[in-house]
Amino acid sequence: MGNEHPLLQRKLQFFLITALFIVLTAAAIVFFLVNVRIQTVNIENCVYTEEEAVRKAANIKLGTHSYGIDKAKISKNIKAVSPYVTDVRIKRTGFTSVSIILTEDAPRFYIQHGGKVVLLSEKLRVLASFESLSECAHLPVYPILLMPVKEAEIGKTVVFEENGSKDDKENPPDLSILDGEDALEILTMLSESALSGTITHADISERFDLRFTYRDKYEIRFGAPRGFSEKLALVIKTIAYLENPENGYSQAKGIIHASVIGETSFEPTGAAEGTSPPDEQGGQAESTKETVKIPNN
């Protein structure tokens, strides 16, 4: 009687394992339902948008189950309250905390339109408008000269005035004015290049005389938009060459001529602010107007 049948032992073991599995699963479910609830909401990368506005738009109530929030709705609501926000990512950072991670468009340029100062991103999205420039003096924004602007609606890309029509003999297009699509394409290339965030003045109002200023130090003259991507790549190499102290121009400011595809040259016009030209370059860097061809390799 002391020895149990092997089949009975296996059934008993199976029962015990199954019972243990059910108990553990039930405990996990109870823990999940009771403890995985939001107690902390963190806002990250919130630079230009008011944090309180983000919290209010997200409307995540403490105690809400972290897997029960509607991420798509929260993202839509946050974008609706801030034109700066281009993307919203919501990430669970613990059992009781979530982070709302923003991607914002930084204000880079400003224009005068409709009697107001309009702030623009590098890709000409309208981010804000002010009554005067003094109201946004705390922001790192710089002037940009554009072709005539028709609309500047907050949260949207600027709309340019129509520049005549090829089929209208009485109102033909002004070929000296840059096309709006070309302007946006040029600024997009700039924003995606190493020059992003470095332009302190821009003039793209004239089709055949595109000009940008790099850090108030180099005026870059691209000429016409043809071959702009190739010109831009070479300008980036040129700036790296000029900034290298070994080449003797790091303390000079001046004009980078890049209107000819495949070549650049530098015309020193003086010493950069806060610096003095080195002795061996002093005369040239001050104002000889001598143009130096830059090596392309």
Image (cartoon, rainbow, N blue to C red):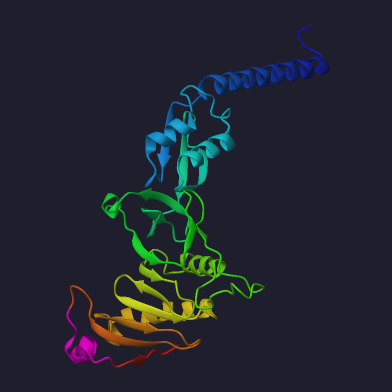
Give the percent coordinates (x, y) of residue 55.
43, 33
Q: Nearer the viewer, residue 57 or 120?
A: 120
For residue 250, which quarter of the picture? bottom left
Residue at 52%, 36% (x, y): give it.
77
Say which quadrant the N terminus sits in: top right
Task: Report x, y in % for residue 122.
Answer: 44, 61
Q: Residue at x 50, y 24 (%)?
A: 37
Identify which residue, 40 or 121, lies in the foreground. 121
* 16 lies above or below 125: above
Q: Is residue 38 magenta?
A: no
Q: Where does the image place residue 3, in percent across and percent down from the top left?
A: 78, 12
Where does residue 32 sit, x and y in percent of width and height? 57, 23
With respect to residue 149, does 18 lie above or below?
above
In the shown orientation, is residue 104 left or right of residue 170? left
Which residue is depicted at the point 27% across and 86% down? 248
What is the total number of numbered labels drawn onto the structure image?
0
Residue 42 sits in quarter: top left
Q: Residue at x 35, y 64 (%)?
A: 143
Q: Report the span colored magenta.
A: 276-289
Question: Vertically, is 44 above or below 32?
Answer: below
Q: Dominant secondary structure of the magenta stretch?
A: helix
Q: Residue reaching furthest front?
A: 170
